[in-house]
Image: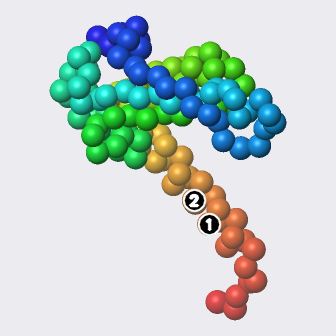
Amino acid sequence: MLHKENLIKELHFKAVRSSGAGGQHVNKVSSKIELTFDVLNSQHLSLNQKETLQEKLANRINKEGVLLLFCDESRSQHKNKELAIKRFIEIIFDALKRQKIRRPTKPSRSSIQRNTDNKKKNSAKKTLRRKPGLE
């Protein structure tokens, strides 16, 4: 079983200066959070889970097997850190969720009968709309 606390212990954070327009304050403060998680060297993930994450998060994981996330939504470093952790947990657990196997079903007898009846009604309705022929 995978626990959030164990995964959070393996995270590494780095505070970076946020990009974009700001004021004098933005040039002094590092409020953007860079979250890194080493998927390949994680001690709390099984081999199977690591492979699944490598497949499903291939666009987010670099060649070294490190997952990178950035968060600069808030002006507060602490809030950005919380948001990054929350987003990380969502991404990991969504990727590890097993998809339900779709089992195709046959239409029931009553639904087939209903369809045939409806088709016959429509057919009769449309034949009555035709001009009477000289037959």
Closer to the camera in the image, 69 or 97: 69
Q: Pointers 1 and 2 in contact (CB under 8 A)?
A: yes
Left/right placement of residue 100 relative to residue 64 reads right
- Viewer can see residue 57: yes
Q: Name the residue under label 1.
A: 123
Q: Residue at x 49, y 43 (%)?
A: 111
Q: Residues within 10 Å of mark 2 (few under 14, many from 20)?
A: few
Q: Which residue is drawn at 59% across and 54% down?
A: 118
Q: In the rendered structure, which amino acid carries the disc numbered 1?
A: Ser
Q: On residue 26, which mark appears?
A: none
Q: Quadrant of residue 66?
A: top left
- Viewer can see residue 100: no
Expressed as whole percent of the image width and height from the top left, the position of residue 104 reads: 34, 42
Q: In which quarter of the image is the N terminus?
A: top left
Secondary structure under tag 1 reads: helix
Expressed as whole percent of the image width and height from the top left, the position of residue 14 reads: 49, 26
Q: Quadrant of residue 36?
A: top left
Q: In the rendered structure, which amino acid carries the disc numbered 2?
A: Lys
Q: Residue at x 29, y 37 (%)?
A: 65
Outermost residue, left side: 47
Closer to the camera in the image, 19 or 64: 19
Left/right placement of residue 134 relative to residue 102 reads right
Q: In which quarter of the image is the C terminus?
A: bottom right
| Disc 1 from disc 2: Cα separation | 6 Å
Expressed as whole percent of the image width and height from the top left, the position of residue 110 reads: 47, 40
Q: Which residue is drawn at 37% across and 27% down?
A: 37
Secondary structure under tag 2 reads: helix
Q: Name the residue under label 2.
A: 119
